[in-house]
Amino acid sequence: MANIATLEAEGRERVGKSNARDLRNNGRVPAIIYGDKKDPQEVSLHLGAFDRLYHTGRIMSTLLDLEIDGKKHRVITRDVQLHPVRDTVIHVDFLRLSKDSKIAVEVPVIFSNEEICPGIKTGGVLNVVRYTIELNCPVDSIPESLNIDLSESEMGDSIHISSVALPDGVEPVISDRDFTIATIAAPAALRSVEEEEAEAAAEAEAAEAAEGEEGAEGTEGKEGAEGKESKEGEKKDKSE
């Protein structure tokens, strides 16, 4: 399950552009906590601490405990605003979570045992269709990742969401189809050879069919000529 990180936060009595600018100049980032049928709460965080979590690439699926005046608030990041030039974090939106909350999060897909995958060992290529999958999860059952075991995957196999074991209560947001996560595809060169062979076989079959038709036409023509000669001979005999 997903780890829960703890960050210290401070409440903000003043809001507005000047206050936000002062916070950023002092190494902090303004933020807001909303949701769970409670009033929004303006807070600020230490920029360095949040920045380290942000650069893990998993901030949008990581549960956080924001500690404010000794009290912890369970949240998940819902939006991160970046400076248009410097690309630094300038504001964060957090969704407050209750014990029974269920949320949609994008979870990364990790592939294991590629080195022993039969399809890859025989020249196949792992073609990843989805690097992340959006899941509806209880707040205490968010998986850190989904592991796809390739140890028995053959060339031409497709890996669908139905083949992935999900934690209890976790389900894909896309529920109307058994979507593909990855395939073990034949390399382009091999596909090209197979296509050329198929085309050559089709051309050979077409040529054989054409020769058969020409032979049939030749036989019919010869039989027709012989019949005509026979009839002309009969007429000549009668006239004599």
Image: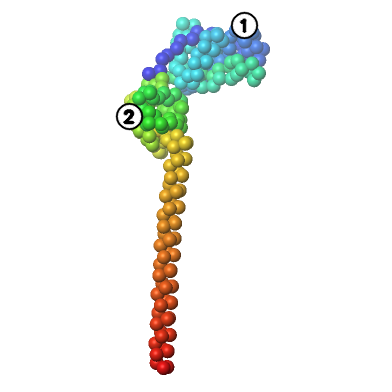
What residue lies at 42% left-to-right and 14% top-to-bottom?
Answer: 4
Mark 1 crowd level (few <14, some 14–19, many ≥20, 10 Å Cα)? few
Q: For this rendering, which residue is in front, 145 or 168?
A: 145
What residue lies at 55% left-to-right and 9% top-to-bottom?
Answer: 48
Residue 116: % across, % down: 35, 25
Q: Which residue is under mark 1?
A: 26
Mark 2 crowd level (few <14, some 14–19, many ≥20, 10 Å Cα)? few
Note whether residue 164 is visible: no
Q: Quadrant of residue 93?
A: top right
Q: Considering the image in quadrants, where does the N terminus appear?
A: top left
Q: For this rendering, which residue is in front, 201 or 106?
A: 201
Q: Is residue 44 left or right of residue 61?
A: right
Q: Which residue is under mark 2?
A: 152
Q: Identify residue type, mark 1.
A: Asn
The secondary structure type at the circle numbered 1 is: loop
- State the CA–CA distance, disc 1 to disc 2: 54 Å
Q: Would you place residue 221 above or below residue 117 in this image?
A: below
The secondary structure type at the circle numbered 2 is: loop
